[in-house]
Amino acid sequence: MSVSVEKLSVAYRSRRGDVTAVDNVSFSLADGEIMGLAGESGSGKSTLGNALVYLDARMKTTGGKVAVDGRELPISDNNAMRHRRMTEVSLVPQYAMSALTPTRKIGKLISDLLKSHHVKDKDAVYTELSRRLALIGLKEDVLGKYSFELSGGMRQRVTIIMSTLLNPSLLVADEVTSALDVSTQRAVGEMLVEFRDRGYIKSAITITHDLSILAQIADSIAIMYAGRLAERAPTSVLVDSPLHPYTQALLASLPAVGVRHDQVTLTGIPGRPPSLANPPSGCRFRERCPFAFAKCTETPPFEEIKPGHLVACWKVSQEQAETAATAPGLPLKEQV
Amino acid sequence: MTTLKLDQVSKLYPSTTRGGGLTPALRKVSFELKPGEVISMIGESGSGKTTIGRILLRLTKPTSGTVTFDGRDIASYSGRGLKDYYQQVQGVFPDPFSSYNPVYRADRVFDLVRSSYFPQVSDKEWSAKIEAALDAVALNPGDVLGKYPHQLSGGQQQRLLIARALLLDVKVLIADEVISMLDASTRVDVLNLLVKLKRQGLAILFITHDLSLGNYVSDRTIILRHGAIVEMGATGKIFGNPQHDYTKMLLTAVPELHKKWQHAPFDPDLVSANGATAAMGSPNGKAATALAHASMLDEITHGEQVVKRDLRAVFGGGRAVASGKSQVAVALEPPALHEFEPDHLVAEPE
């Protein structure tokens, strides 16, 4: 198991007290697993991803443990983390397209990176670099260019190359495909998979609000809602038979190619996610959930309904218990 | 009939990268937007889709060609006439967060409309009008009025801007990537709102790079590439039976929930910029990897360079200014469109 996150909570300091953006989140990643992390804006998905690599001044952990390759990751200790970044955990930041400074050439940025991480065998890294550039179809002359001379997709790929150059165990890729055209999106998505296949990265967390991209590249998908995990399952299971009402609503709001307004009227999810400054008790999706009932005022456990399929929903747990009682072994499937 | 019509509209921008020259953003684009019609303008970045929106809103002047509204050239409007034009044609832009001045309350956008267009309207009448507009975009006045932009969600901000456009009794709405910044759950609400407005007779130019969203709302679709129309017609026909290789490539790249990307049709040759020669090819056996697809990107950049080089040849070096109109015309020549079936035009391969 390359990554394990246990009961992690991350809060933002604010004048009105701490705002817990990630609340008691636990999950683990197998070697070679790409996990997609999806949710609405403000669900805490970026906070979770960032916390694993870099806690900025506004953020602090309020509990929990993270381990990479069996070694604990001191995420709240910025100095200790400095030595673990790039080699064990690495981040492709949100808006990576504008993450590259326009005042330095790409090659200079890379040599800075090697210097600050005290890489001894630079030649080996440079040989590897040219191999990887060739692999993703970039010519080596990008190293002599400034970031503004590259197209958005090229910049995005250069950023990923830099983030993965020292072969991190865990790559957190935050919205890497969001600002790109469909064809570029595809190339960048496939690049992540290829890097995993070749062992440049051991595992990855891909954060996005676009479930259809995750359906293409992720091995498993975790859905986050208001700071908590709502559902986690292997990709095909989550896409084809989601159990959490929120996941179902989210999938129902995506137009498929070829669907037109006069044939099918898609529906959004009414209401807004609760404020995290003062979150309601119990299930946080309760207010917007069509199936909410009395029990939902208690916080549902994030429990394994089937092997590898975890859901935090009272209704699902209840139905699961009933199905188990009447027809053991029958797969639980439902549609909205 | 309030039809907005583009006739052979071209736009050249001075190139921003080293080497200078002129980049054609639009090459002789012609189409019509009729009342009650939604046209999806689909293209990748650099295809000129936003430039079309800007030209229609008179924020950018076309290098050549004309835009007419009700048969009158919009370039001829000034003063009072221009103000009237803006009362009928309005735009909503991709980023709602930067469309507001954070210093003022968000509903100031309504006040500005009032002071320039409806100074005589009484307070009571005006608030009724605002309420109707907010109602049309499914916003609760209590939730949004008097709030600062940061207190509103992206979806609310974007809908507020659409409501602002509705206050003016617009006939045409230029919706440039209005939902790309929104979450999936609120995105659909804005889309359904556009459908509702269209049923009330509003003409909408829906500019997007998202094919499935474009397909969902539109009656007709225009696929743009390198500033030229490559395919145009009824949405069902284009998505149901795409003819141009570029359209096909775009459709195969769209991520779908229940279907994995297929590798076979994703051949860089298909999108090679000059059609005849597949310049990138697959040397050194690298094409065996899935990432060979990525080379397609460079192919597109290469295509842009070809166009630029042609222009430089025409203008003699990178510094020349467009002077001879006929020469511009040669360099700008878009691929010819032919009718594949009724209401379905396809461009020749370029």
Image (cartoon, coloured by chain):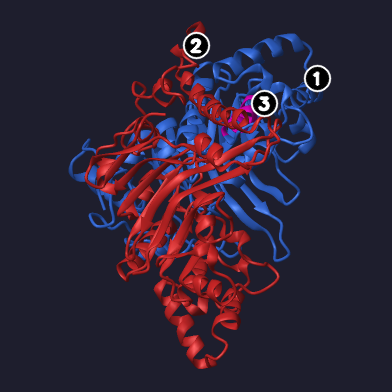
Residue located beneath label 1 in the image = A118
The colour with which the image depicts chain A is: blue
Depth check: B43 or B229 in front?
B229
Relative side of A134 to A115, left or right: left
What's the residue type where badge 2 is placed?
A: Lys
Residue located beneath label 2 in the image = B286
Considering the image in quadrants, where does the C terminus of chain B appear? top left
Q: Calculate the distance from the C-alpha at mark 1 to the C-alpha at mark 3.
A: 15 Å
Q: Calculate the distance from the C-alpha at mark 3 to the C-alpha at mark 2.
A: 21 Å
Q: Residues within 10 Å of mark 3 (few under 14, many from 20)?
A: many
Q: Quadrant of residue B18?
A: top right
Relative side of A322 to B124, left or right: left
Secondary structure mostly seen in magenta is: helix
What's the residue type where badge 1 is placed?
A: His
Q: Is residue A55 above or below residue A89?
A: below
Depth check: A119 or B323 in front?
B323
Depth check: A236 or B198 in front?
B198
Q: Is residue A161 magenta?
A: yes
For the magenta stretch, what is the residue range?
A: A153-162
Local SS, label 3: helix
Q: Mark 3 or mark 2: which is in front?
A: 2
Numbered circle sitting on residue A162? 3
What's the residue type where badge 3 is placed?
A: Met
Local SS, label 2: helix
Residue in view at x 63 percent, y 60 percent = B98
